[in-house]
Image (cartoon, rainbow, N blue to C red):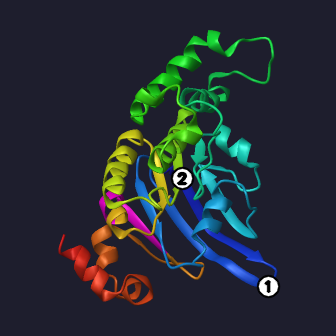
């Protein structure tokens, strides 16, 4: 069986410090996986390995059955994997529409050229409009991205992440800094825009994790101590002791 994403005994060390210690997991096409763990567990390092920002010290990363470890981030992106970051990463002096159009150009075959006017690229413009409607920012089409609210900027970043048609999406703490109501709306948005796609998200908000994920991967000090359904992770004694705490597990069980 070929998985959308597979990690095989993945390891990363910085000097003598082991950050990722033999992580192995398999993510099926269309599955939503949340990666949780205490601060310093290695979650962002794991994302940086998968997306090509870091090279593994050992192990393999496979996308659709083909190895991508050692490839550059732009090469991995062109193979169908895209990610967002903890810090909002948009073009603040471009409009919402222009930000999204930047995200679709390469996937539609437009390379570096000064011979085409962007306004005449009907397919790119149509795709940007389509994504803009998906992320509910069509009424802000010509607004400078830097003038959007924080939640709108996060939505725009997700729009840019999916605009190129990637089928594997990595979201790094997408709801960080949001109010409870904003978070609730954002969970709905993430579900809508990732239908049919494979999703990995790093998240600290347990309401987001248990409301979004099909399976949860628990990372503690670089070691994967659990990878299972939300209910099974809730009941896992080792997870409760290492991260969730019995009170959090009991609270989630009551919802």
SS for tag 2?
strand
- Relative to 224, residue 129 above or below: above
Which callout, 1 or 2, points at the residue further toward the start of the chain?
1
Q: Residue at x 70, y 21 (%)?
A: 110
Residue furthest left in the image: 254
Verify CB contact (< 8 Å) between mark 1 and mark 2: no
- Relative to 249, residue 177 above or below: above
Q: Residue at x 67, y 37 (%)?
A: 78
* Residue 19 position in % (x across, y down): 67, 78
* Residue 82 position in % (x across, y down): 59, 45
Q: Which residue is mark 1?
A: 16
91 left or right, relative to 252: right
Q: Which residue is mark 2?
A: 170
Residue furthest front in the image: 147
Q: Residue at x 48, y 56 (%)?
A: 174
Q: Which residues are magenta?
A: 210-218
In depth, the one of 13 and 148 nearer the eye is 148
In depth, the one of 141 and 191 nearer the eye is 141
> Mark 1: few, some, or many residues within 10 Å (few <14, many ≥20)?
few
In depth, the one of 65 and 18 nearer the eye is 18
Specify whether residue 211 is painted magenta: yes
Picture quadrant where residue 243 is located: bottom left
Query: How far is mark 1 from mark 2, CA to CA?
Result: 28 Å
């Amino acid at each position: 069986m070929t998985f959308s994403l597979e990690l095989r005994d993945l390891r990363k060390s910085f000097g003598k410090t082991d950050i990722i210690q033999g992580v192995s997991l398999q993510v099926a096409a269309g599955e939503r996986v949340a990666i949780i763990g205490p601060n310093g567990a290695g979650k962002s390092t794991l994302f940086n390995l998968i997306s090509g920002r870091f090279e593994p010290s050992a192990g393999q990363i496979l996308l659709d059955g083909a190895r991508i470890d050692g490839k550059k981030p732009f090469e991995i992106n062109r193979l169908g994997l895209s990610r967002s970051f903890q810090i909002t990463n948009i073009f603040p002096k471009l409009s919402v529409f222009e930000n999204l159009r930047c995200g679709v150009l390469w996937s539609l075959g437009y390379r570096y050229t000064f011979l085409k006017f962007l306004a005449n690229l009907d397919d790119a413009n149509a795709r940007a409009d389509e994504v803009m409607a998906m992320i509910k920012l069509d009424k802000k089409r010509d607004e400078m991205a830097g003038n959007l609210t924080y939640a709108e900027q996060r939505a725009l970043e997700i729009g840019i992440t999916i605009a190129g048609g990637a089928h594997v999406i990595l979201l790094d703490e997408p709801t960080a800094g949001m109010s409870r109501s904003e978070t609730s709306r954002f969970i709905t948005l993430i579900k809508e825009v990732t239908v049919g796609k494979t999703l990995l998200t790093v998240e600290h908000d347990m309401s987001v994790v248990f409301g979004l994920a099909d399976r949860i991967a628990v990372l503690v000090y670089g070691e994967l101590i659990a990878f299972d359904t939300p209910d099974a992770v809730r009941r896992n004694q080792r997870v409760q002791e290492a991260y969730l705490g019995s009170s959090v597990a009991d609270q989630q069980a009551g919802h």
